[in-house]
Image (spheres, rainbow, N blue to C red):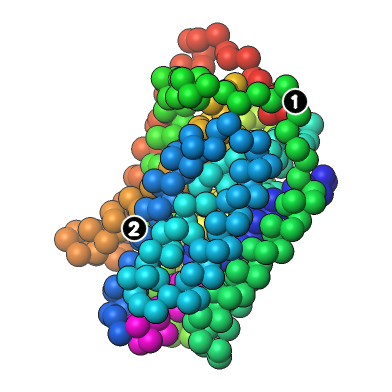
Amino acid sequence: MPIALLALTAGAFGIGTTEFVIMGLLLQVSADLHVSIAAAGLLISGYALGVAVGAPLLTIATRRASRKTVLLALMAIFTLGNVACALAPSYEMLMAARVITSLAHGTFFGVGSVVATGVVAPEKRASAIAIMFTGLTAATMLGVPAGAWLGLHFGWRSTFWAVAAIGLFALAVLAVFVPRDRAEQRPAALAEELAVLARPQVLLGLAMTVLGFAGVFAVFTYIQPLLTRITGLPEAAVSPLLLLFGGGLAVGNILGGRLADRALMPAVLGTLAALAVVLALMQPALQTGWTAGLFVALLGLAAFATVAPLQLRVLEKAAGAGQNLASSLNIAAFNLGNALGAWAGGAVIDHGPGLGALGWVAALLTLAGLGIALWSRVLDRREPPLECASARA
């Protein structure tokens, strides 16, 4: 395993922690800044919006810089953004700091994916992406609970100081271990970068990411009321069950990478189909405590098994000058899927059949992504395949 991958994983851990840690700090932030819990929750939405907007804009703005320089600059933005969060005197300033911090997210994972695939053999590209994304799974399992514990005992600002320290560490290891671009990796012209958006297969890849992953957050956003109101578990049981979700993420992430290295498009189709099945089984699975625990673990596994295949599919179809932009756009697509899923789940709860129907709605969203993937596979067979440019180029 190239040590450069571990450096990228360290950066992913810090970014993943700051994205989700606010979930465990809502009560402290709302009390300290005198806002409602719902308003504090918007700090999550603001971050997701910043990711979606920042990913393409920063990728285009930094296209002439070397990938290593871009990664270092993004980690510096991330670190300073968390310092600003820790110092924010008001809710508005905290929101602004969160949005600034989020700008680094999409481009870091997008460019980082390209770098990760470039430091391994071609047949290990999906596994390399999966290894980098273990930083996100580790953030879910370790960073977010640790941040919530810090916030509870030392105040919510201490959590952001800790994440800023993680950013400094990641900045150091990225500077030391990520290789510089080779001389032949010339900056692409803007027209070359944007031309990737004219490729139907790239657009289909982005669409399958948005819809395929939307099903995950249609359920996961509301996992606490699902477990307490349908399963009947006490609130204290939710956190241990979320550890099962994190464990499933870790296993699914590596599994998805290995499957994609063996056969990419079958991995895309298979993981999306498996995710749809898990989501469809939500209602019966939540009837008892042990089956609910099994469902939560399988949801994590199936959700992150899709990540490496979906990311590599877009990278493969964007081979050439547009890889950085397409890769970053696919990270934005994951976040748009998160937002779409959360919105659809909320609409079902407020205006539809209610909590119990979330699994079916989530499964339909993922099946829509699977349908796009099937159509993309049909186009593969109708068209001569693109030459898969090596990520080393």
Is 107 placed left or right of 261 in the picture? left
- The amino acid beneath tag 2 is Ala
Dot 1: few (<14), some (14–19), or many (≥20) neighbours within 10 Å? few
Identify which residue is drawn at 28% across, 54% down. 344
Question: Whole-percent x and y of residue 279?
Answer: 43, 54
The answer to whether residue 107 of the structure is visible from this angle is: yes
Question: Whole-percent x and y of residue 23?
Answer: 44, 72
Query: Which disc number belongs to residue 342?
Result: 2
Is 124 placed left or right of 71 in the picture? right
262 vs 46: above or below: above
* The magenta segment: 21-33
Q: In the structure shown, which secondary structural element does the residue marked by tag 1 occupy?
A: loop
337 in the magenta segment: no
Nearest the viewer among 240 and 105 is 105
- What residue does disc 1 label? 183
Nearest the viewer among 369 and 320 is 320
**Of marks 1 and 2, which one's residue comes earlier in the chain?**
1
Identify which residue is drawn at 56% across, 41% down. 110
Q: How many numbered marks are there? A: 2
Q: Quadrant of residue 150?
A: bottom right
Is 264 placed left or right of 277 in the picture? right
Is 387 placed left or right of 104 in the picture? right
The answer to whether residue 327 of the structure is visible from this angle is: no
324 vs 39: above or below: above
Question: Whole-percent x and y of residue 56?
Answer: 45, 39
Asked if labels 2 and 1 touch by Cβ distance under 8 angstroms, the answer is no
- The outermost residue toward the left is 351
**Quadrant of the drawing holding the C terminus:** top right
Q: Nearer the viewer, mark 1 or mark 2?
A: 1
Q: Quadrant of residue 77?
A: bottom right
Q: Quadrant of residue 25?
A: bottom left
Identify which residue is drawn at 32% across, 70% down. 92
